[in-house]
Image: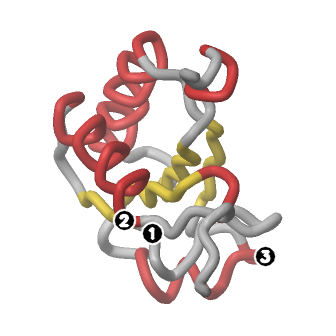
Amino acid sequence: MFPTLALRNFACRITLFTRSNCKLCSDAKEVLSNVWDKRPFEYDEINVMDHSDQKWKNMYEFDTPVIHVDKAKEASQFGTTHEAKKLMHRFKEHEVEKLMDEAMMDAPSSSSTSA
């Protein structure tokens, strides 16, 4: 049995860490939009300069844009996880798709059990 299109479409969650007046961030959004057209995914966007996201500001203030790619079911309710696959600064569509594939392959399955 093959997974339905609906299940495959949202297999990944991508979180974009961005900031205002960032040309690379605009470019990253365009790349993600093009990927979305081929392979829809859950999406979240975090402005690292937002006062409510001090953790992300400390981590990525000088490194935007950054994307985290997680297996959708394993991403926390707050978005990304520490185990997320990451791309920074300049990236192309095929790199994002490759990371999506890696996230799906590396992430433990919720249905796997040990005997």
Residue at the disc numbered 1: 84
Q: Is residue 111 above or below residue 26?
A: below
Residue 34 location, x and y as percent? Answer: 37, 16
Q: Is residue 54 above or below residue 68?
A: below
**Does residue 42 appear to the left or right of 103 in the view shown?**
right
Residue at the disc numbered 2: 106
Quadrant placement of the N terminus: top right
| Nearer to the camera, 8 or 88 | 8
Residue 85 location, x and y as percent? Answer: 36, 64
Q: Earlier in the sequence, mark 3 or mark 2?
A: 3
| Nearer to the camera, 56 or 82 | 82
Q: Nearer the viewer, mark 1 or mark 2?
A: 2
In the rendered structure, are the residues bearing label 3 and label 1 in contact, judged by CB atoms less than 8 Å apart? Answer: no
The quarter of the displayed image where residue 62 is located: bottom left
Q: Residue at x 51, y 58 (%)?
A: 70
Residue 102 location, x and y as percent? Answer: 30, 54
Residue 11 location, x and y as percent? Answer: 57, 39
Q: Earlier in the sequence, mark 3 or mark 1?
A: 3
How much space separates mark 1 and mark 2, taking CA atoms? 10 Å
The quarter of the displayed image where residue 84 is located: bottom left
Q: Residue at x 42, y 51 (%)?
A: 104
Residue at the disc numbered 3: 52
Q: Nearer the viewer, mark 3 or mark 1?
A: 1
| Nearer to the camera, 33 or 50 | 33
Q: Residue at x 18, y 31 (%)?
A: 94
Quadrant placement of the C terminus: bottom right
Q: Residue at x 23, y 28 (%)?
A: 93
How packed mark 3 is, by other alpha carbons closer than 10 Å (few <14, some 14-19, many 20 or more), is few
- Looking at numbered disc 2 in the image, what kind of residue is underneath it? Asp
